[in-house]
Amino acid sequence: MVTYETFYRPAELSRHARRLSAESYRLARRLMRRSGSGYVFVPIRSLQHMAVLEADEFIFVDGHERRTIVLAWRGFRAAERGALLHQPVAFEAVHYAPAAAELMRRLPAELPPALEALARRTGAASGSAGAAVIDLAKRRPG
């Protein structure tokens, strides 16, 4: 079943450079790839907010006022890391409501567990693709 949602973007209040951990960025991208639609709804119950992840931006809406964007993470610059894939990914945090500052302060601790919980429920958790590590040293004769 496909769900369509419309979100409203108020006037921008401020914009700040931020970084997202490489692990959270990779897990978000994995969830988007597995979704089939390219976007993912991530409930962040501890904050009473919903994250909507798309390739170009992550938006955050209040759980009670679900149509208005409070905060957006835009302009992910993953390519700037080069071969250092363990490095955080730079982005811009765009605040659309006064509550965005407090939300931004809490999201680095609250978003990763929400992503992991969704990955477990949808089978996108790390290692769930059926990959296996084979110790070649044990398989060699001699």
Image (cartoon, rainbow, N blue to C red):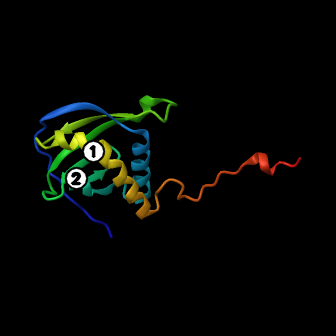
Q: Amino acid at mark 1?
A: Leu
Point out the tag, 1 or 2, that comes first from the N-terminus.
Answer: 2
Q: Residue at x 30, y 48 (%)?
A: 110
- Measured as percent of width and height from the top left, residue 45 is found at 26, 58
User: Residue 29, position in %: x, y?
Assistant: 41, 48
Instruction: Give the residue at the far bottom of this rendering.
Output: 1
Please give the residue where the numbered disc 1 appears in the rendered image: 107
Between 91 and 24, which is closer to the camera in this rendering?
A: 24
**Residue tagged by mark 2?**
47
State the separation of the CA atoms marked 1 and 2: 8 Å
Hey, which quadrant is residue 117 in on the image?
bottom left
Q: Secondary structure at mark 2?
A: helix
Circle 1 Cα neighbour tier, 10 Å, few/some/many (<14 / 14–19 / ≥20): some
Instruction: Return the x and y of residue 82 as percentages of the image width and height.
Output: 48, 29
Which x, y percent locates residue 130?
A: 58, 59
Q: Are marks 1 and 2 in contact (CB under 8 Å)?
A: yes
Q: Residue at x 27, y 44 (%)?
A: 107
Density class for disc 2 (Cα within 10 Å; few <14, some 14-19, many ≥20) is: some
At 13% across and 44% down in the image, what residue appears? 99
Q: Is residue 43 above or below residue 21?
A: below
In the rendered image, is residue 134 in sight? yes
What is the total number of numbered labels drawn onto the structure image? 2
Relative to the observer, which residue lies in front, 44 or 91?
44
Q: Secondary structure at mark 1?
A: helix
Q: Is residue 98 left or right of residue 21?
A: left
User: Residue type at mark 2?
Assistant: Leu
Residue 83's disc number: none
- Image quarter hosting the N terminus: bottom left
Note whether residue 36 is visible.
Answer: no
Above or below, 82 relative to 2: above
